[in-house]
Amino acid sequence: MFVKEPFDCCYGAEGGENLLLTTEDNIKLADFGLAFSLQVNHLSMTASDGAATDECGTLLYTAPEVLLGVRYGRGADIWSLACTLVEMLTCNPPHQNILSEYARKKDIGAMESFRRRMSSTQPSDQLEYSGTLLTPTASEEIRLLLDCLFTKEREHRPKIDDILNLFSNTDADTEVSIDLQKVLSLKKEISMNLSNYSKN
């Protein structure tokens, strides 16, 4: 689905169960109960005092900044989009196996540990979110795209325009492909930004 006009909304409830497929093969979002209007600054992060900081949505699709209880915006939807893409490719959202094991044991402490690991800023304690780990049989383009979408630092996560720029239509607009060189370029740009960010 390509949106022709941007609108200031943070969706907040991505997941396979909230995607509808039309007879024309367009994807539509459903369940706008968690959506909210945004007043955004130049980084597409919420800027108003009434900005969302509440945790909402399904845990396995929730961005780290939401779990940390800080202001969030469209970047949280990009994270959720990545989780939905993983689910589409594997039939499970990221780390479903770990969460299911904790739930089976009914271990509340382990569940809290899982939430903490999802939002941890310490590399040694973080759950790994990488295309290779989560979708090992996907194409290189998809694995690299997921690496970009799963950027932990929301300030450096790609914007929707960056993502849409990676795709091109071929064969009389019936096929859409991902340009490997563009994905590599985006990943390199994110890595350089993160490197500069960590030096400051």
Image: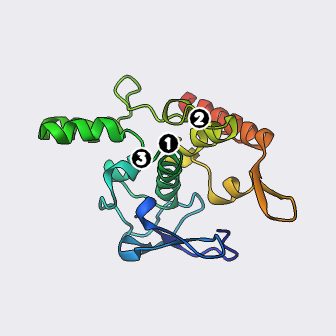
Classify the position of the N terminus by image quarter: bottom right
Q: Nearer the viewer, residue 86 or 43?
A: 86
- Asked if one can make out residue 14 in the rendered structure from this viewpoint, the answer is no
Residue ID at (35%, 35%) = 120
**Does residue 80 appear to the left or right of 188 in the view shown?**
left
Residue 70 pos. (x, y %): 35, 53
**Counting residues from the N terminus, which is met first, the one under dot 2 or under dot 1?**
1
The crowding category of the residue bearing disc 2, from other C-alpha atoms within 10 Å (few below 14, some 14 to 19, many at least 20), is some
Q: Is tag 2's residue or tag 3's residue first in the polypeptide sequence?
A: 3
Kindly give the residue lying farthest to the right in the view shown. 172
Q: Which residue is mark 1?
A: 153
Compute the Cα span from label 1 to label 3: 20 Å
Q: Are marks 2 and 1 in contact (CB under 8 Å)?
A: yes
Q: Nearer the viewer, mark 2 or mark 3?
A: 3
Tell me if I can see residue 147 in this picture: yes
Foreground residue among 161 and 138: 138
Q: Residue at x 30, y 35 (%)?
A: 98
Q: Name which residue lies at 58% across and 33% down.
A: 137
Q: Amino acid at mark 2?
A: Leu
Sequence order check, earlier mark of 1 and 3: 3
Residue 126 % position (x, y): 37, 31
What x and y, as percent, mark residue 187? 67, 37
**Which residue, given by chain and number where applicable, does mark 2 sit on?**
194
Look at 38% across and 34% down and name the residue there. Answer: 121
- State left or right for residue 71 relative to residue 27: left
Q: Position of residue 173 (x, y in %)?
A: 82, 65
Question: In the image, is residue 169 above or below residue 127?
Answer: below
Between disc 1 and disc 3, the foreground one is 3
The residues bearing labels 2 and 3 have C-alpha atoms spaced at a distance of: 26 Å
Label 3, on which residue? Answer: 93
Instruction: Please indicate whether residue 86 sits to the left or right of residue 5 in the image.
Output: left
